[in-house]
Structure formats: structure tokens, C-alpha cells
Image: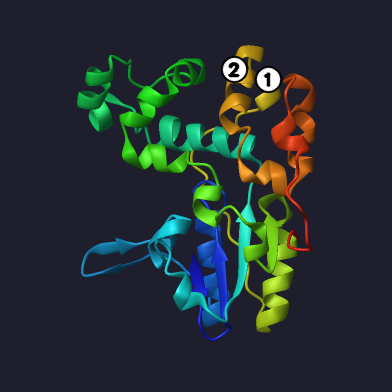
Amino acid sequence: PYTMPAQRMAFFFSPKAGGTSLRAFLFHAENGFAFRDFSIQGHRVDANKLTANYRFNRVDHGALEGYRRFALLRDPVKRFLSGYSNRVLHYRELSIEAAGRDLLREGLPPDPDIATFLENYIGYLRCSKPLARHFLKQQKFIGPDPDYYERIFRLEDLDTLVGFVNGECGTQAKMPRLQTGGPTLDFFALDEDVQLGILDICRHDIAFRIFPEYWAPYADLIEDDTHGAEAMPRTGTAG
């Protein structure tokens, strides 16, 4: 998480859920000036290097005793599509150059279209650890219990998060839009079998339980939507 010791605040987030932009925004709120990439002795430092984003079970939670804890979540389907667009299409992490030996071992073609990616999802994830990390469900990074947090924000409502943090910190920090490489994919323009494949992968993401409204656009596409209907108890933690 990104921690702000002076403010006693900690923010948890997942890959492809606004984490790069959030890091830069919190840096601005903490320091009073906007972050921009810089170099130290030839080594480039971007917003992702401001803090490591460990899995929830690897975080030193004892060090966060007394901190106000917050989390940021994203629609799991949009997050999946963003991950495919950014990591597979833009960064080409499943290209011959990046993963040729592993692709050969798995018997998979490079640079897969989204249907091929879904058909061989587990095999492709075995070909790239960085790629696989971006497709872990969000509970791997924010944990299983929403009561751990004072408040949980949605990526789609970033203005709410920005207003809250600036109000708490007495700042006027801006939220940049970073890590945008890759085309925007429209879920409802995809073939039905592709849609169902994505939903089958994403259906148990914690975001659907904390924010049932995330599931609403997809509810008619799959018969068993108990993962969306069985919302986790909401105790004022979601914002």
C-alpha cells in the first residue's frame, strides 16, 4: 500500500485498478507538488516505483497499527479488459521476444487475440509472471474483509476520493491519468462466448460483493450470479 505516516493513512489497491495514478496523486497530497518521472544516476523512476504493491498477506499489518486504512476497487470486467489491452496488446508481454521459450513450452501462439487468450488463459499466465500478477483478483491485494477499511472507493468515482483526501490533508492535489497504453475494449461489443469467458474468470472478484452495482450490467448474461447477489455485509466501509 501507499502509506502517509504524517497523516496516518494507508491506501491499498490492485494492478490495473488505478494504482499508478493513485501513487502519483498521493505523492502530490503528501509533498505539496506534483510527481513527475525523474532519473537517479541513470535509473528512471516513475510513479510505480514510489511504493511496492505487495499482496495483502505479505503486508506488515503491524506497522499500520493506528493508521486509517482505505482501498480502491475497479469493475472486475473493465479491469480484466484493461489488463489484456495494456499488458498483452500494448506491452506485448506474450510476444516471442518477451515469452518465446515459455510459449513454446506451453504450445501456445504469441500475441493472442482475446478469444485465444481466454481459451488458454491458465497456460498464458504461466508464460509470464508479471502478466499473471495483473490478473490476480483484487482480494489478493486488498484482502477478504471490507471491515478492515474505514472506506472503500471505486475507480469510477475518483472525484470522490480526490475530494476526500484533499479535504483530510488540506491540499489541492490533482489525480493524473497514467498507465493508459493500449486500446479501449468494449465488453458488450465482444462475441458472446468471449463475454461469458471473461465473466467466468472475474465472477468471484471481491469487488462484485462489495459493490453489487458492478455486477448489474452483466447479470443477464450468466445464469448463476450468486457471486454478485451474495453481497458482503456492508457496514459503511464502501464509499
Q: Is residue 32 left or right of residue 124?
A: right
Work out which residue is located at the far bottom of the displayed protein and give it. 6
Q: Is residue 119 left or right of residue 204?
A: left
The vertical placement of 138 against 2, above or below, is above
Q: What is the x, y in percent for residue 164?
A: 72, 71
**Type of the residue with mark 2:** Val
Q: Which mark is residue 194?
A: 2
**Label 2 near label 1: C-beta < 8 Å?**
no
Q: Is residue 50 left or right of residue 171?
A: left
The vertical placement of 158 against 99, above or below, is below
**Element carrying mark 1:** helix
Residue drawn at the location 62% of the way across and 39% of the way down: 76
**Type of the residue with mark 1:** Ala
Whichever of callouts 1 and 2 sits on the residue coming sooner in the sequence is 1
**Element carrying mark 2:** helix
Quarter of the image with the C terminus in it: bottom right
The image quarter in which residue 102 lies: top left
Q: State how far apart marks 1 and 2 are (Cα).
A: 10 Å
The residue singled out by tag 1 in the image is 189
The vertical placement of 113 against 46, above or below, is above
Residue drawn at the location 66% of the way across and 45% of the way down: 207
The image quarter in which residue 94 lies: top left
Mark in the foreground, 1 or 2: 2
Q: What is the x, y in percent for residue 89?
A: 44, 30
Q: Is residue 67 left or right of residue 101?
A: right
Relative to the observer, which residue lies in front, 143 or 111? 143
Q: Mark 2, residues whose alpha carbon is within 10 Å: few (<14), some, or many (≥20)?
A: some
Quick check: can you spot residue 34? no
Q: Which mark is residue 10?
A: none
Q: What is the x, y in percent for residue 85?
A: 50, 33
Relative to the observer, which residue lies in front, 63 or 24? 63
